[in-house]
Amino acid sequence: MQPDHAVPPTERLRFARRTSVEQVEEGTLLAPKFDRDGLIPVVTTDADTGEVLMVATMDAEALLRTVDTREAHYWSRSRQARWRKGASSGLVQDVVEIRIDDDQDAVWLRVRVRGSGASCHVGYRSCFYRSVKPGGALPGGPVELRFEETEKVVDPKELYGDAPTPTRL
């Protein structure tokens, strides 16, 4: 049984069929390869700075909505739902450019974020607000992280109220 976010028959017409390696790698038509769950990974960066803001997934409909509206749409694996980035927070990602990789199984979005510029539901500018400390691990313990962003750009409580976090353990 296909997941509900697999490519619907009417949307298949918007994507080219994958007919040859040459067509996929050198062709001029979008022929994305979704995984067995009907998803494709997406890297989203700031169009001006190149900073990585987030990594997410899209189903076919999210990719087509992104192409059509020039606003980023994603598939949330934790919520099992499609969403337009910024629908509840106002932190809409306006798409400047959409790129596809060589074998068309990954998407790169270059965006500008409306409002405060935050892209992370935790309130930071980027979802990649921490790094692994050089030397990494505590003696006999876990690997340590350090904050690269020390100030939140927005207060998540102001944006989302009492809505639960999408993070799942």
Image (cartoon, rainbow, N blue to C red):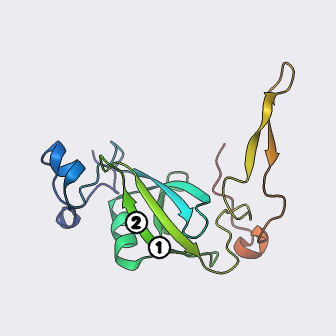
Q: Which of these two is toward me, 101 or 86?
A: 101
- Say which amino acid is labelled 2: Ile
Residue highlighted by disc 2: 98
Q: Residue furthest right?
A: 139
Q: Quadrant of residue 116?
A: bottom right
**Could you say where residue 33 lies in the image, as x and y percent from the top left?**
29, 49
- Residue at figure coordinates x 36%, y 51% from the top left: 101
Considering only vertical position in the picture, is 51 above or below 133? below
Q: Are marks 2 and 1 in contact (CB under 8 Å)?
A: yes
Mark 2 → mark 1, Cα distance in angstroms = 7 Å
Secondary structure of the residue carrying numbered label 1: strand
**Residue at the spot 64% in from the left edge and 66% down from the top edge:** 119
Q: Is residue 127 above or below residue 123?
A: above
Q: Residue at x 85, y 26 (%)?
A: 138
Query: Can residue 143 be spotted in the picture?
Result: no
Residue located 40% across and 71% down the image: 66
**What is the quadrant of the N terminus in the image?**
top left
Residue 4 image position (x, y, % from top left)? 33, 56
* Residue 30 picture location, percent across and down: 25, 60
Number of marks: 2
Q: Amino acid at mark 1?
A: Val
Disc 2 secondary structure class: strand
Name the one closer to the observer, 147 or 68. Answer: 147
| Residue 107, placed above or below residue 71 | above
Question: Of the numbered discs in the image, which one, if any, rests on residue 66?
Answer: none
| 10 Å crowding of disc 2: few (<14), some (14-19), many (20+) | some
Residue 164 or residue 127, whichever sits in front: 127
Q: Which residue is mark 1?
A: 95
Can the viewer see residue 32 in this picture? yes
